[in-house]
């Protein structure tokens, strides 16, 4: 028997050796939409966790990312053939329901045709693909929704995302579809997420703001979704049987009105100018009332994390706080 100290020494050496081994990234990830709200977080998550990571964008690509027009099948083929990724995380899409409603041609080309093309090219080189989809594929009449519940999208955005799911799984049966609800996180401007955009109204104390209190949402931090994408990709390397539809979501049910009140509370701002609107919204694309996602499939795999909404909004909104005095006393 060796003394305990010698064993500890051997263990330590092995630990060091393994670290050297794993510090050379031999896993490659391609992130589409890496300039977008979710893609930025996904890119960061893979990059910081030992993946050789390439992000692509379009209008905002340069200089950090590859500029690839995903509408061009030749360009899609070229980047996938050149980089030969092990995992492709497809975050590029047209996600604004009102734009999708008004520009259906454009939306379906980007959402459907492009996704099918990425799926075909990924399958050809044996890369795992995660297609990011939405809880809007459901109509909201019977929450919570499991992965195999029947979709019934109410608006064109949900319809094209659902078509995208189908064409992805047809062209790449080993792919994964990850459905997520309303996302928020570090934004380039407050309007980038419909959750963070509420902060403008919250800080404008002098103006009464009527805010939706009808639709139940589950605001989800992009860093949490990014973590799910990475963990799922790593699990897939060990277990090639992993594929199909997955759900991920925050677990705090809130209306936009409740999100706005929470933001006011987090930053100790007045909220008496915020007014709840309890009726179904009359304008814009049709929206389902409650599309809670049952996430137990990923939970059972031990995958996922959930940033509390108060913590998430404090982190991503404080740069937009107008009251510098308050910022100084609390953060410095
Ligand atoms: N945001 C949400 O609340 C939400 C909710 C549920 C599901 N999702 C899904 O999550 C995914 C990511 O959404 P997001 O909010 O991160 O979107 P986003 O911020 O609007 O980003 C869209 C991305 O798509 C890229 N893109 C657009 N047209 C392109 C083209 N022709 N070629 C190459 N790239 C192009 C954009 O690149 P450039 O800007 O560089 O042109 C950008 O990186 C989408 O699949 C969306 O459906 C989002
Ligand atoms: C989620 O679905 C699982 C079965 O897949 C079920 O056991 C569980 O009770 C469901 N959770 C909720 C909150 O409905
Ligand atoms: C709802 C919608 O726009 N559907 C279209 C999606 O794109 C395909 C082509 O890839 C069309 O055939 C669908 O009509």
Image: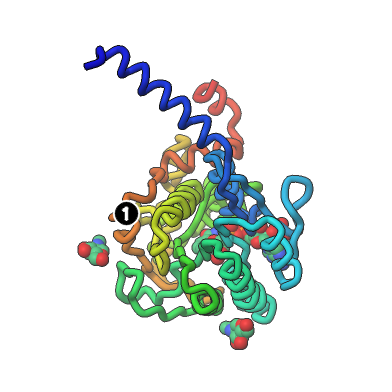
Whether residue 257 can be seen here: no
Asked whether 193 or 179 is in front, the reply is 179
Residue at 54% x, 50% y is: 196
Question: Crowding near pointer 1: few (<14 within 10 Å), some, many (20+)?
Answer: few
Relative to 273, 51 lies left or right: right
Label 1 SS? loop
User: Where in the figure is residue 138, as x and y percent of width and height?
Assistant: 41, 75
Q: Where is 77 relative to 46, above or below?
A: below
Residue at 74% x, 59% y is: 58
* Image quadrant where residue 283 sits: bottom right
Asked whether 296 or 88 is in front, the reply is 88
- The quadrant where ligand 2 appears is bottom left
Assign the C terminus to one quadrant of the image: top right
Relative to 133, 65 lies left or right: right
Q: Where is 255 relative to 150, above or below?
A: above
Residue at 56% x, 23% y is: 328
User: Where in the figure is residue 2, as x and y percent of width and height?
Assistant: 25, 15
* Image quadrant where residue 8 sits: top left
User: Where in the figure is residue 278, as x and y percent of width and height?
Assistant: 39, 66
User: Where in the figure is residue 5, as x and y percent of width and height?
Assistant: 30, 12
Asked whether 43 or 211 is in front, the reply is 43
Q: How is the image coloured?
A: rainbow
Whether residue 320 can be seen here: yes
* Image quadrant where residue 244 sits: bottom left
Assign the N terminus to one quadrant of the image: top left
Which residue is the site of mark 1?
Answer: 301
Residue at 46% x, 32% y is: 18
Relative to 78, 225 lies left or right: left
């Amino acid at each position: 028997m060796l003394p305990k100290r010698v064993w500890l020494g051997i263990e330590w050496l092995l630990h060091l050796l393994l670290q050297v081994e794993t510090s050379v990234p031999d896993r490659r990830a391609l992130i589409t939409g890496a300039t977008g709200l979710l893609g930025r977080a996904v890119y960061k998550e893979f990059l910081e966790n030992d993946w050789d990571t390439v992000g692509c964008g379009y209008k905002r690509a340069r200089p950090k990312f590859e500029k690839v027009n995903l509408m061009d099948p030749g360009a899609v083929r070229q980047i996938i053939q050149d980089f030969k990724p092990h995992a492709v995380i497809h975050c590029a899409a047209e996600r604004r329901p009102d734009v999708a409603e008004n520009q259906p041609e454009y939306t379906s080309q980007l959402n459907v045709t492009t996704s099918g093309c990425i799926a075909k090219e990924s399958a050809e080189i044996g890369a795992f693909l995660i297609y990011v989809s939405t809880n809007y594929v459901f109509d909201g009449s019977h929450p919570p929704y499991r992965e195999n519940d029947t979709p019934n999208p109410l608006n064109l955005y949900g319809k094209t995302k659902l078509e995208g799911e189908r064409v992805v799984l047809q062209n790449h049966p080993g792919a994964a579809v990850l459905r997520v609800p309303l996302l928020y996180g570090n934004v380039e401007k407050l309007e980038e997420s419909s959750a963070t955009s509420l902060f403008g109204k919250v800080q404008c104390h002098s103006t009464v703001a009527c805010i939706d209190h009808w639709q139940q949402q589950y605001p989800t931090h992009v860093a949490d979704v990014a973590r799910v994408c990475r963990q799922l990709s790593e699990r897939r390397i060990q277990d090639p049987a992993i594929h199909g539809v997955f759900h991920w979501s925050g677990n705090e049910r809130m209306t936009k009105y409740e999100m706005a009140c929470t933001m006011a509370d987090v930053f100790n701002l007045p909220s008496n100018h915020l007014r709840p609107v309890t009726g179904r919204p009359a304008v814009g694309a049709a929206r389902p009332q409650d599309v809670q996602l049952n996430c137990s499939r990923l939970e059972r795999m031990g995958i996922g994390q959930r940033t509390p909404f108060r913590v998430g909004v404090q982190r991503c909104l404080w740069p937009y706080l107008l009251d510098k005095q308050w910022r100084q006393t609390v953060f410095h």
